[in-house]
Image: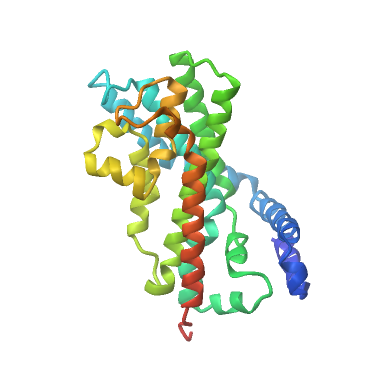
């Protein structure tokens, strides 16, 4: 923890706005905080290991539910167990990436209720960067590892041949999915500027979004298919990229290149989240505590 305090004190000493606004300076400061918080969390190795195990156990139930379903039926919406496992693994890994770096936004409501967000606004660094760098859920690596393991087992059972194009598509989908979930976390955090407490509806699109993304769209109603494609693009987290990776035709009738648009969907979500955050900060009113 001493390393974190030293890193934060170094940041507070930087008073030149033009220097702080430089992207490379922000990146260097973030790496400094990232390293400090990593050392702080792993200082107590047994406790850190327990948190990783807890992260795995807390999410393994979701995949057990999938196994139970396929224990009664051979296919689900035309998808086999291995194919659904690919969807689950991609969604789990993308969400783990987002959770790892969005921890600070999950705690924003506490800053607002306690009045400590006022202090954030008085510092030379931007509010977004400060909240982004305020915490790191490094133990979420447990969920990430779980997704990697399930994907490895699924690809072996399906006999997927990983070409460079497919590998690039997988990496792009995971990063894009992480950005999409991260953007949802930011929008949920920004809602605290109006509601003070985190809006529970956001959980429908974060934790609920992971569950929804773990199953093929064929099993959902048409309105929900359109919603997760054109409104909150959870289908671009794993479904459309998985169609290309698995060589499956799109049952929705969309052209095959739609599976390549995950980065575009992520960029749009990121832009919307940034705008919502900026509007929320401008309209923030102190609790007076």
Callout count:
0
| Of 145 and 184, the residue lying toward us | 184
What residue lies at 48% left-to-right and 19% top-to-bottom?
155
Hey, which residue is sitting farthest bottom in the picture? 288
What residue lies at 42% left-to-right and 19% top-to-bottom?
247
- In the displayed structure, 74 sits above or below 194; it is above
Q: How is the image coloured?
A: rainbow
What residue lies at 39% left-to-right and 74% top-to-bottom?
194
| Of 9 and 262, the residue lying toward us | 262
Is residue 26 toward the left or the right of residue 276 in the image? Answer: right
Q: Position of residue 147 (x, y in %)?
A: 49, 33
- In the displayed structure, 106 sits above or below 168; it is below
* The image quarter in which residue 234 lies: top left
- In the displayed structure, 62 sits above or below 37; it is above
Quadrant housing the N terminus: bottom right
Q: Position of residue 165 (x, y in %)?
A: 57, 24
Is residue 215 toward the left or the right of residue 122 in the image? Answer: left
* The image quarter in which residue 28 lies: bottom right
Q: Is residue 208 visible?
A: no
Q: Position of residue 46 (x, y in %)?
A: 61, 44
Q: Position of residue 221 (x, y in %)?
A: 21, 39
Q: Is residue 209 visible?
A: yes
């Amino acid at each position: 923890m001493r390393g974190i305090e030293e890193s934060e004190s170094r940041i507070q000493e930087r008073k030149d706005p033009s220097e702080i606004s430089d992207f490379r300076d922000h990146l260097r400061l973030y790496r400094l905080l990232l390293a400090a918080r990593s050392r702080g969390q792993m200082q107590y190795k047994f406790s850190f290991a327990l948190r990783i195990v807890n992260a795995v156990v807390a999410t393994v139930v979701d995949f057990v539910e999938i196994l139970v379903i396929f224990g009664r039926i051979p296919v689900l919406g035309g998808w086999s167990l291995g194919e659904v496992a690919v969807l689950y693994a991609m969604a789990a890994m993308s969400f783990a990436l987002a959770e790892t770096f969005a921890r600070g936004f999950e705690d924003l409501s506490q800053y607002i209720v306690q009045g400590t967000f006022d202090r954030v606004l008085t510092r030379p660094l931007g509010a977004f960067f400060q909240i982004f760098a305020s915490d790191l859920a490094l133990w979420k690596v447990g969920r990430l590892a779980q997704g990697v393991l399930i994907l490895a087992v699924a690809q072996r059972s399906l006999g997927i041949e990983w070409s460079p194009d497919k590998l690039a598509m997988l990496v792009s989908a995971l990063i894009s999915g992480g950005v999409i979930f991260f953007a949802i976390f930011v929008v949920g955090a920004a809602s605290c500027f109006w509601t003070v407490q985190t809006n529970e509806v956001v959980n429908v699109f974060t934790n609920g979004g992971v569950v929804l993304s773990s199953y093929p769209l064929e099993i959902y109603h048409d309105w929900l298919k359109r919603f997760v494609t054109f409104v909150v693009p959870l289908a671009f987290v794993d479904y459309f990229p998985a169609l290309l990776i698995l060589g499956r035709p799109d049952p929705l009738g969309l052209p095959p290149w739609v599976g390549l648009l995950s980065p575009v969907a992520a960029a749009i979500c990121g832009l919307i989240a940034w705008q919502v955050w900026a509007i929320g900060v401008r309209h923030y009113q102190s609790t007076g505590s």
